Image (tube, rainbow, N blue to C red):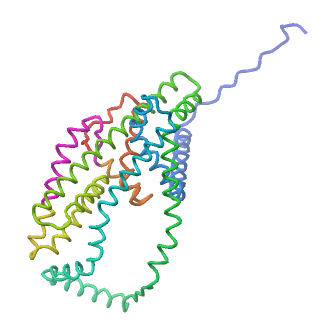
Amino acid sequence: MSLRTIKKAPIVRLPPKSNFEIFFSRMSQVATIVVGLVTFIFALKMGEYILAPIFLGIVIGLMLGPVATKLEYKGVRPGLSAFLVVMLFIIVVSLFALAVAAPLSYWIERLPQIWVDLQRQLADLKGPFEALKGMRGQLREITGGDGLAVSVDEGMGVESIAMLAPSLIGQILLFFASLYFFVATRHETRATVLSLCFSRRLRWRVAHIFRDVEHVISKYLLSITIINILEGLAVGIALYLIGIPSAPLWGAIAILTNFVVFIGPAVMVVILFAIGLTEFDSLGGSMIPVLVYLAINTIEAQFVTPMVIGRTMTLNPFTVLLSLAFWIWLWGALGGFIAVPALLIVYAIIRNIIPVADWQADGRAL
């Protein structure tokens, strides 16, 4: 067969896609991404028992990583440095718990008396409550209901504690195991992830993501911890000067609540308002502890924190609020603590994926 008899296969040119086809192609991609996100969120919600303590251990490990690194520079092996870091964390938490245990138990015993005092102090608001009762009566007449019967089982509290104790102990053990192994193997984990990158440019970006995440999280948490401790000391001293009993306890609670932005200070305001109602004879006087706390918190939020953390940690407040709402809905109080670190991790990843974007614009220091 001669070469002339060989015919080339005809070139088939497909007609260009219509706008309708392009639209549905892109919508299918968007639908795939949405389904993936929903599945991921559902997995986080269902895996709360295991994932929440692990994620908390990673966040605390990122915070204490620089401490372990300094120990390793002095010749300490990574396994031993991780053990020392975990023991340091346990000692600090134990000392904090011992410091607040006695005054907290005293106020827990006083809860019935506090409730009586609150009822007496809130007697001035009897008019609005009577109006609410009238509205409830009218609503009952409209719906034709006779109210709800509420029964309380006296053994419910003890049984609930007995059922929750093994779960809580398991989560605590999982948290400390995650904290130890993350700190001890952080270098090996980074090297393993980088070895999976198939190009030099991808390895460079992943390495920068690791570096930025460690730097941002450790700087934020260490700085916020120091700031919160100083604010708690200031709150405790100020409350002591105005005659509030157990002032160190409220200062310690202020330290803890300030880790949860927005919601933490609001909870502290409610607590101090209740304490003020029990210690002062008027509603105006009960606002004194609240005003003292708000003054200190405002100075911290508007001047101290921006000065210490600076513009490198600047995030949009609305983004912070969305992250806080999402993680609290997902994992409760624990989610409130990790909301901002999780947002900072996402911020560090996006900044390296899209380095030209100005992700710090129109924000505020946390």
Tally of marks: 0
Determine whether, in the image, residue 262 is placed left or right of residue 355.
Answer: left
Residue 114 location (% of width, % of height)? 22, 78
Which residue occupies 46% across, 78% down?
158
Which residue occupies 44% across, 58% down?
331
Magenta highlight: main SS: helix
> Which corner quadrant holds the N terminus?
top right
> Which corner quadrant holds the C terminus?
top left
Residue 283 drawn above or below residue 193: below
Which residue occupies 19% across, 62% down?
247
Residue 296 location (% of width, % of height)? 15, 53
Which residue occupies 14% across, 73% down?
279
Determine whether, in the image, residue 322 is placed left or right of residue 272.
Answer: right
Q: Who is closer to the viewer here, 289 or 43?
A: 289
Residue 207 location (% of width, % of height)? 47, 28
Q: Dividing the picture into quarters, in which one does residue 134 lie?
A: bottom left
Q: Who is closer to the viewer here, 133 or 44?
A: 44
Residue 84 drawn above or below residue 321: above
Q: Residue furthest right?
A: 1
Would residue 343 be counted in the magenta stretch?
no
Q: Who is closer to the viewer here, 87 or 191?
A: 87
Residue 292 location (% of width, % of height)? 13, 59
Residue stretch rendered in magenta on the structure: 292-317
Determine whether, in the image, residue 19 is placed left or right of residue 341.
Answer: right
